[in-house]
Image: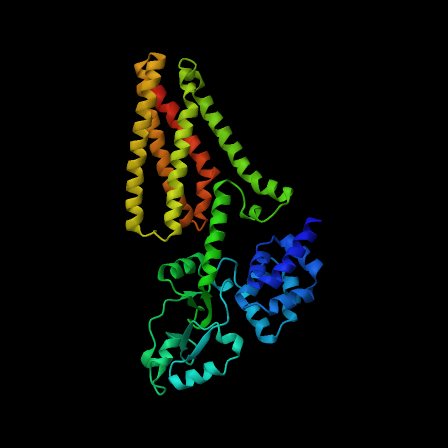
Amino acid sequence: MKLSADIRKWRVLVKVDLKQAATEFGELTAEDASRFVDALGVDYMVKVISQLGTDAAAECMQPLSPKVRDQIIEGLPAEKAANLREILSYAPGTVGALMAKEFFSIPVDATIREATEYLQSLPQERKGAISYIYAVDKNRRLEGVLQMRDLLLHKPGTKIQEIVRSPVLQVETGMPQLYAAQVLQKHHYLGMPVVDREQRLVGVVRADNVIKIFRREADDDIARLIGTSPDEMKTTSIRRIIFARLPWFFVSIASGLLCAAISGIFQNSIGTIVTLFLFVPIVLGLSESTGVQGATIMVRNIAVGKTTFKNLGLLLLREAVVGVSIGIACGVIVGFLASYWQGSAILGVALASSMTVAIMFSALIGLLMPLLFMELKIDPTLATGPLVLAICDIQTLFVYFTLSIAIMR
């Protein structure tokens, strides 16, 4: 019943805001998208896709199975079908899968008169999309860029190569979409050319897609931070949600068993200083907070492109100092209160020392794990959730018991 209502709403949205309808369809799960097509029919989807630009059309078709995609593409005009096949051939998350094929290129050795005549010959619906005009050589390699006003400010006989701006900031089809979004945001461009491995111009990334990329990245980061899958943000299926969350609970179970094993190692010694157990929740809570904070800050710096050796070195030094300072401050406070409460100065010293070291290690773990994941080509965001908590818990208990017992003896 709910699916029927969603389909009716989507059909209304198609009439009101076609591009937004394409975006919402592209965010469906593969299962829901398949149900939509079954209910609407392939012919209806062909009609919708034919009205969209190639980037929006590819986005709309992203959740569909290869078989359904082929059925829709077969109903499209030959040129658009070929363009969509090219875009959909790139891996999701790459610039190639995001680019639009509607762009304007002219030979670099043409004149302004020839360029103007070419633009005037274009269909009316394409003229509204002009932002930049790209100059290419005979092999379609990008030579430079110019804007519409450049055609008005120079004489008709002027060669394009005399007024073209070069070099041009560009991205390759295999690059991450987030990188392209960051460049567009930084330079405030309306679009950016996309080239293939041979540096031939094959498409353009539009600025209006940047917000979608940042929103999608934010959704993915939030999902991984809380220990689930980004797909959960799109589905209402209880079964899918359960299977998305279960793996991270297994991580928590495993870390809990390891923590129990560590406690077992020290059980003979702990028998004489049971008081240490009273402060385990405080130590673990402070250590976990420090680790997650460090990991989140590092992932944020990676996301905004601050990954140079100089920036990372300063960040590591800063966070290490912060971790030590927080560890000392928290350790002294808890140690003082513990010694006053239990009437044992040596207990206060043990707590202060062990907490300082454990919190310092957690800060370093939080900072270094995202870097390790990035080096291993794994999403660094995974290092900000249950995984960093589990590792911080394990090292904290080990350091806490080992150092405290050694001091108290």
Q: Quadrant of residue 281?
A: top left
At horizontal 61% and vertical 52% (from top left) the residue drawn is: 29
Instruction: List x then y, in percent, for residue 111.
Output: 38, 85
Can residue 407 be seen here?
A: no
Q: How many marks?
A: 0
Give residue 306's position: percent from left, percent from top: 34, 51
Question: Which image quadrant for residue 370?
Answer: top left
Residue found at the very far bottom of the displayed protein:
157
Using the image, determine if residue 116 lies above or below residue 245. below
Q: Quadrant of the C terminus?
A: top left
Whether residue 3 appears in this view of the structure is yes
228, 405: nearer the viewer:
228
- Name the residue at 64% across, 68% down: 47
Q: Residue drawn at (36%, 70%), measured in percent from left and top? A: 168
Quadrant of the rendered structure where residue 106 is?
Answer: bottom left
Look at the picture and state if 36 lies above or below 85. above
Task: Please identify the residue farthest to the top as the structure is shown.
Answer: 343
Q: Tell me if residue 382 comes above or below residue 401 in the rendering.
A: below
Query: In the figure, is residue 215 to the left or right of 290?
Result: right
Q: How is the image coloured?
A: rainbow
Q: Position of residue 349 (x, y in %)?
A: 30, 20
Return the x and y of residue 175 as percentages of the image width and height.
Answer: 44, 61
Task: Name the residue nearer the viewer: 109 or 389.
Answer: 109
